Image (cartoon, coloured by chain):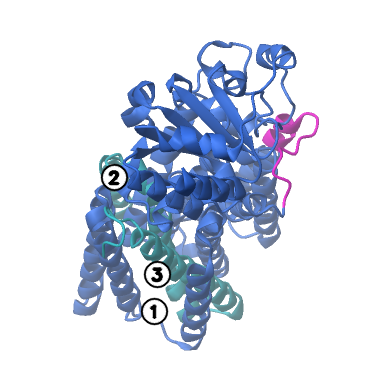
Chain colours: A blue, B cyan
Amino acid sequence: MSLRDVLIALAYMIASACFVIGLMWLQSPKRARAGNLVSSLGMLLAILATLFVSGIKDYTMIIIGVLIGSTVGAVMARTVKMTAMPQMVGIFNGFGGGASALVAAAEFFKYATDPNMLTLDVSITIMLAMIVGAVTFSGSMIAAGKLQGVVNERPITYPYQNVINLIFFLTIVAAAVFLVINFGHPWVFLYMTVAALIFGVLFTIPIGGADMPVVICFLNALSGIAAAMAGFVIKNNALIIAGSLVGASGVILTQIMCWAMNRPITNVLFGAFGAVVTAGSGSATATTKTVKPIQADEAAILLAYAQLVIIVPGYGMAVSQAQHAVRQLADELAKRGVTVKYAIHPVAGRMPGHMNVLLAEANVPYDQLYDMDQINDEFQNADVALIVGANDVVNPAARYDKSSPIYGMPILNADHAKQIIVLKRSMNPGFAGIENELFYNEKTRMLFGDAKESLTKLINEVKNV
Amino acid sequence: MTEALLAALYIFVVAMFLGFAVITKVPPLLHTPLMSGSNAISGITIIGALIVAGRQEGWLQTILGLIAIILAMINVVGGYLVTDRMLQMFKRKPGEK
């Protein structure tokens, strides 16, 4: 090992440490931003060190690629709206997985011309990096398309879907095993690649919009694993470490999201949740019940004379971009001495922490944002629970109605509040297609209309109270 | 099974456990920045892309490497910048810098 190689290896070691620090400092919002900076400097160090790797002879492509990639990445990051963050993360995720797959492909063609250099572990990890990377790429693109509304958000299903997908997957595995045994055969490799890309699509289309938090996390884990596999291929520890960290992060977030919906990962990924409107007992009785509408002036009085108001945001808030209006209403209430808190369900929105980011964008101080476990016991003291575009996460049927598709999902105890005001566009059921009993509760009043417009009316009315 | 491979497997497994230990402590408040930040880290595959694109072992590899660099750099630069943009919004009091 030359001195140069030692220095490069040390640089990779420091970079890996920077990544760990970056993740450690994410434990508190105070240091998180500094941690992200440390992490990015680690990445810069790793990139600079790589430029001195002895095998690199030509820098033309490197300069072109880095310039294009950096510019596109910077523009995307600067211009994206906070409400569109889930699809942005999905796209970046897919690109990371795609890059790992391309590295594996390049290594495949290198060894294909010179198979004597090949060892078993390299050939196996080339196939794994290729398959996982390709699935991550196409799966993330579909997920991002669904989040953006380009691809139908509803689950797309066809008969024997899981069986067909499984057979398809097995042919990919067969191609990979064949290639490990008989290295070379570019056409088999091409089949494996294209099949993996198609599999990523097939695997993602049956998953509905409300399950996107899980899918995005799962694909995040895959992108890390693809990077780690690419690390085995090119024998680089920085890739293995960074890839494992990301893989672990994705796995944990996937698990947290599944717990928050009380559904096993297999059900989320293969269950095509939300494909059909399931008629639970809640919807059968619901037709006989009526909801009680409320006008903005009356709602404003309820809010203005409350002591504690708990706001429950949901995906509807993101759709109508209402986070700033929510903050203004909270400000007006605070001026009158009302305590305002926010209750954030782990799967509210389309990715983990989605609501927190939107409210932070609207300048809501983060110590007013409470997780489900922190705030659920406080609802009984709340004078008003204000539901802004949330639905399934406050449906009491989840507690006892065994026929309900969301039975067993931990929910926010909004129904324990003394009064409940629901901001809702219409009486259409939520994503899961389930009637929400909360709307028919004795204590519930419905304020119909676009969330943002309703909030604007409420702000004006509160000012006049 | 070479010694180098075993060492790599050690690193893989230990890094996974390190990841689990560190990430379980990240509060739900910061889960979105965690995703985008870890996303940016997965762009580490840029190292492989740079090596593949720069070693001049045939046009096919170079083209694959070039595309890999572009994708990985979008992932890295975009991921870190967007995470920074999000994290600077998290404040304890309104208007706090």
Say whether disc 1 or disc 2 marks the residue closer to the N-terminus.
Answer: 1
Determine the residue positioned at 57% across, 70% down.
A113
Q: Which residue is mark 2?
A: A367
The CA distance from mark 3 to mark 2 is 39 Å
x, y (%) of residue A137?
59, 56
Question: x, y (%) of residue B96?
Answer: 26, 61
Q: Nearer the viewer, residue A264 or A308?
A: A308
Instruction: Answer whether residue A448 is visible to the viewer in this image.
Output: yes
Circles 3 and 2 on the same chain: no
Q: Secondary structure at mark 3?
A: helix
The chain letter under disc 1 is A
Q: What's the residue at 68%, 11% (across, down)?
A: A281
Please state which amino acid type lies under the numbered disc 3. Ile
Residue toward you, A305 or B44: A305
Query: Element under label 1?
Result: loop
Relative image position of residue A14 (x, y in whole percent): 21, 65
In the picture shown, does residue A21 fall above or below A368?
below
What's the CA distance linking mark 1 and mark 2?
51 Å
